[in-house]
Image (spheres, grey):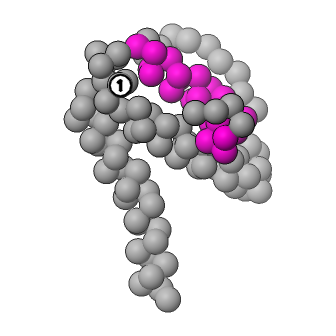
Amino acid sequence: MSTGSYNVFLGCSEGEDRWLCTLLLQQGWRVEYNAASDSYTNAPQEFREFYNQRRRWGPSTMANTLDLLATGSLTTERNKSISKPYIFYQTISMASSILGPATVCLMIA
């Protein structure tokens, strides 16, 4: 993927932490949850801020998931923590994320 492509813009500019995790997973690294870690964030205080945050995070999450799915077989070879059933689950999850709202819109129209 070229550095000027739309997916790279969404992945690294709009969700750089998730993009970093995706790159690490694709290279064979393992990313784990650590409950003892400390972090600081500025959480949205108003609905408008929350809405704008989710509007930014949605496309970047989809771009990173699609990037992971595009390299799914290579990632499962390099990373023993990611299995083919997990890639299949992400495929179904991505399809339902697209088809679910589309179905609702069709039912309302």
Taking depth in this image into account, of 52 and 36 the one nearest to the observer is 52
- Residue depicted at x 59% and y 22%: 20
Find out whether residue 8 is within the magenta segment.
Answer: yes
Question: Image check: 92 left or right of 23?
Answer: left
Residue 92 visible to an observer of this rendering: yes
Indicate the position of residue 82 as horizontal and vertical percent values: 31, 24
Tell me if 15 is positioned left or right of 44 in this view.
left
Residue 65's x, y, as percent?
47, 40
For residue 73, above or below residue 54: above
Q: Residues within 10 Å of mark 1 (few under 14, many from 20)?
A: some
Q: Is residue 13 above or below residue 105?
A: above
Q: Which segment did they paint magenta?
A: 5-28
Name the residue at 37% across, 58% down.
96
Residue at the outermost left position: 85
Q: Amino acid at mark 1?
A: Leu
- 80, 17: nearer the viewer: 80
User: How far across and how far down the image is residue 54, in percent?
Assistant: 64, 49
Q: On the rendered structure, is 88 left or right of 90? A: left
- Is 73 placed above or below 46 here? above
Say which residue appears at 68% left-offset and 31% top-offset: 3
Q: Nearer the viewer, residue 48 or 54?
A: 54
Residue on which disc 1 sits: 74
Q: In the rendered image, which quarter contains the N terminus?
A: top right
Estimate the x, y position of residue 40 in percent, counting from the top left: 70, 21
Inspect this view and state whether residue 35 appears. Answer: no
